[in-house]
């Protein structure tokens, strides 16, 4: 029984965006569509337990949800004669409605509409597209469930009030709107990769961002940045298991056991990156994926292709100057040209990154390599870091430096 | 000009052991190989298939569809190229340059008929490859099985889902390329007794694996033979 409900859970999560997407097209409201989906899930639970899951669960769920919506609409009409005839004709047809890829895309684009704040876009996407409960989302972002629930309710209200067009943006609008969708998946992944506070990673968020990334590849198969982002996520996810040692302490990339990286997932990344290359443009996600590919396919840390990595960082900086990108580039400088050059590359980054713990952590590392006292920088990094694994890593470096100074 | 399919038969267990740098070389090698075929105006179509462990095989037992989850054996179809060449030897010459993973083989088979829809990876939605399989005690019997499948499925492809497909000549009319001691050796196309032999490959756009399997279960393919359903990789 346990096993069956796990399978059903899997099916509901996987099918939710397709079914809700089709329902929003019919019913015109995310809220009503979600309610109808919930009812369909309840109906499915009792029916599938007896008869087993049907061959096409999405069609079954859509039909059940549609029936529920029809009943509600009828009831509403009797209660309130002025209520609009909610596409009664369409609802009355018996055969399951075809869910089309565009339904899912519309839903994603609406949840990631730039009129909503980025955090809200992420919460709404996790809820509506990924099928997370508000409780799941609250735990992922260490926020009270009430806050998340309110945020989602407000977002749905905004969508209805602003009459956000529920459609796939046209060619002219697509780049900006797509950037917004990719930013949501990227943030979801980043939060899963290194949480802002608390434990090192949240694997469920990483898995979900990987799934959403792959879904976007299927829905927008000719957008290089979609494949770049998916590849980037795959490369990082493939290394997740080696990021800590057996005690749970953070291991830097240079110290990880590369033989334990997840090879099938690396292949996913390489295939997606190849598709991005075929499609042409090198946008910021494709360039980040290229860098990740250099790291992931290098046999050793020292054997990494730093020249290729430097080139990608230069291209990234040319696309959009960013002190964080410059900081990452400094690592490649240090590895290719030595720590002195690395320190020089950091010099002008202190002002813009004065509150970023990794700036001090990195400068400390370069100073340590040069035999200088790095404790001040490690302390500053520790003061600024929120992630527990990173904090304990920094504390260990301080302890080591103290022992060395004695 | 005659057309040929180069089928990449992979030893997936060996393939999974490749270091990331070797996988990278293989992925980039295929991209370069495709460009080379295109430059020589030999390229017609090509694609890679996702791991067989994600696939399904639909056959029949006592008249009822029988669905099995992959992997299905020690060799899996990992990808294919369709190319044009003057004759079989020229096609084999082109095939010998195709990247191979350890323990893999290449089958070069003349095309009997079909139509290609190149660039299926640009299609929105998911694309599944259907590998048509037939089993018979000898090649003549196998051709009969394929004829029956061909006859009964001719009009069975939904136009809004079908993305092209081909039927292959019998293995005896093809060649097999294997790698031995760093060199590529060419053998006659073997017909293996009491083993399923690939007779064709076609593609359909489907919402998901369940739908892809559902369609196959109700099709004529499984009455006379079997199909292996494998998702197309986007690369």
Image: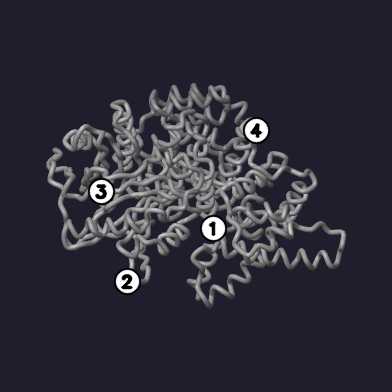
Mark toward the viewer: 1 or 3: 3
Quarter occupied by residue A302: top left
Of all chains, the one bearing label 4 is A
Mark toward the viewer: 1 or 4: 4
Instruction: Provide the secondary structure element on which disc 4 rests.
Output: loop
Residue A79: give x, y in percent of width and height.
85, 67
Say which residue appears at 49% left-offset and 21% top-offset: A344
Mark toward the viewer: 3 or 2: 2
Q: Residues within 10 Å of mark 4 (few under 14, many from 20)?
A: few
Image height check: is B30 above or below B211?
Answer: above
Instruction: Provide the secondary structure element on which disc 3 rests.
Output: strand
Instruction: Provide the secondary structure element on which disc 2 rests.
Output: strand
Which is nearer the eye, A132 or A388? A132
- Residue B9: which disc? 3
- Circles 1 and 4 in contact, beta carbons < 8 Å: no
Image height check: is B224 above or below A344?
Answer: below
- Residue A14: which disc? 1
Badges 3 and 2, same chain: yes
Instruction: Provide the secondary structure element on which disc 1 rests.
Output: helix
Quarter occupied by residue A58: bottom right
Q: Which residue is mark 4?
A: A173
Residue A127: give x, y in percent of width and height.
64, 55
Where's the C terminus of chain A, which quadrant? top left
């Amino acid at each position: 029984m346990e096993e069956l409900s796990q399978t059903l859970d899997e099916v509901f999560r996987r099918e939710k965006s397709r079914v809700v997407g089709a329902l929003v097209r019919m019913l015109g409201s995310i809220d009503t569509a979600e309610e109808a989906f919930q009812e369909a899930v309840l109906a499915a639970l009792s029916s599938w337990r007896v008869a087993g899951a049907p061959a096409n669960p999405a069609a079954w769920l859509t039909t059940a949800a549609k029936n529920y919506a029809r009943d509600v609409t009828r009831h509403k009409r009797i209660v309130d004669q002025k209520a609009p005839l909610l596409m009664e004709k369409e609802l009355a047809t018996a055969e399951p409605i075809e869910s089309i890829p565009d339904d899912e895309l519309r839903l994603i684009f609406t949840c990631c509409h730039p009129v909503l704040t980025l955090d809200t876009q992420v919460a709404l996407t996790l809820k509506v597209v990924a099928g997370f409960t508000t409780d799941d989302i609250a735990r992922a972002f260490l926020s009270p469930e009430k806050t998340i629930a309110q945020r989602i309710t407000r977002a749905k209200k905004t969508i209805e009030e602003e009459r956000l067009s529920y459609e796939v943006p046209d060619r002219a609008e697509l780049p900006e709107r797509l950037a917004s969708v990719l930013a949501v998946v990227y943030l979801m992944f980043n939060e899963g990769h290194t949480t802002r506070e608390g434990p090192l990673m949240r694997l469920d968020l990483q898995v979900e961002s990987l799934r959403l990334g792959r879904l976007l590849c299927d829905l927008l198969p000719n957008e290089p940045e979609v494949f770049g982002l998916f590849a980037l996520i795959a490369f990082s996810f493939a290394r997740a298991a080696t990021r800590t040692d057996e005690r749970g302490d953070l291991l830097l990339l240079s110290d990880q056991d590369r033989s334990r990286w997840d090879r099938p997932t690396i292949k996913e990344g390489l295939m997606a990156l190849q598709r991005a290359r075929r499609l042409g443009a090198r946008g910021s996600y494709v360039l980040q994926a290229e860098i990740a590919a250099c790291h992931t396919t290098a046999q050793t840390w020292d054997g990494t292709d730093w020249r290729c990595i430097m080139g990608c960082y230069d291209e990234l900086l040319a696309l959009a100057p960013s002190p964080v990108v410059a900081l990452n580039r400094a690592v490649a400088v240090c590895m290719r040209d030595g720590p002195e050059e690395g320190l020089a590359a950091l010099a002008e980054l202190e002002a813009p990154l004065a509150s970023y713990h990794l700036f001090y952590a990195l400068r400390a590392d370069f100073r340590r390599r040069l035999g200088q006292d790095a404790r001040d920088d490690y302390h500053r990094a520790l003061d600024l870091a929120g992630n527990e694994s990173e904090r304990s890593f920094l504390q260990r470096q301080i302890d080591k430096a103290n022992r060395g100074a004695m | 000009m005659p057309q040929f399919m180069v089928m990449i038969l992979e030893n997936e267990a060996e393939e999974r052991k490749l270091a990331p740098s070797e996988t990278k070389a293989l992925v980039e090698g295929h991209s370069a190989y495709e460009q080379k075929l295109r430059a020589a105006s030999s390229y017609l179509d090509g694609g890679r298939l996702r791991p067989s462990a994600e696939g399904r095989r639909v056959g029949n037992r006592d008249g009822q569809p029988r669905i099995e989850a992959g992997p299905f054996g020690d060799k899996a179809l990992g990808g294919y190229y369709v190319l044009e060449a003057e004759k079989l030897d020229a096609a084999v010459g082109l095939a010998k340059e195709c990247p191979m993973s350890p323990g893999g083989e290449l089958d070069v088979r003349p095309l009997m008929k079909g139509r290609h829809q190149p660039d299926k990876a640009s299609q929105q939605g998911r694309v599944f490859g259907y590998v048509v399989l037939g089993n018979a005690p000898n090649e003549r019997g196998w051709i009969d099985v394929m004829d029956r499948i061909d006859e009964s499925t001719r009009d069975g492809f939904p136009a809004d889902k079908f993305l092209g497909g081909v039927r292959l000549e019998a293995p005896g009319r093809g060649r097999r390329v294997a790698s031995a001691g760093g060199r590529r050796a060419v053998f006659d196309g073997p017909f293996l007794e009491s083993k399923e032999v690939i007779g064709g490959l076609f593609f359909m756009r489907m919402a998901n694996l369940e739908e892809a399997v559902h369609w196959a279960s109700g099709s004529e393919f499984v009455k006379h033979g079997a199909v292996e359903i494998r998702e197309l990789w986007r690369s």
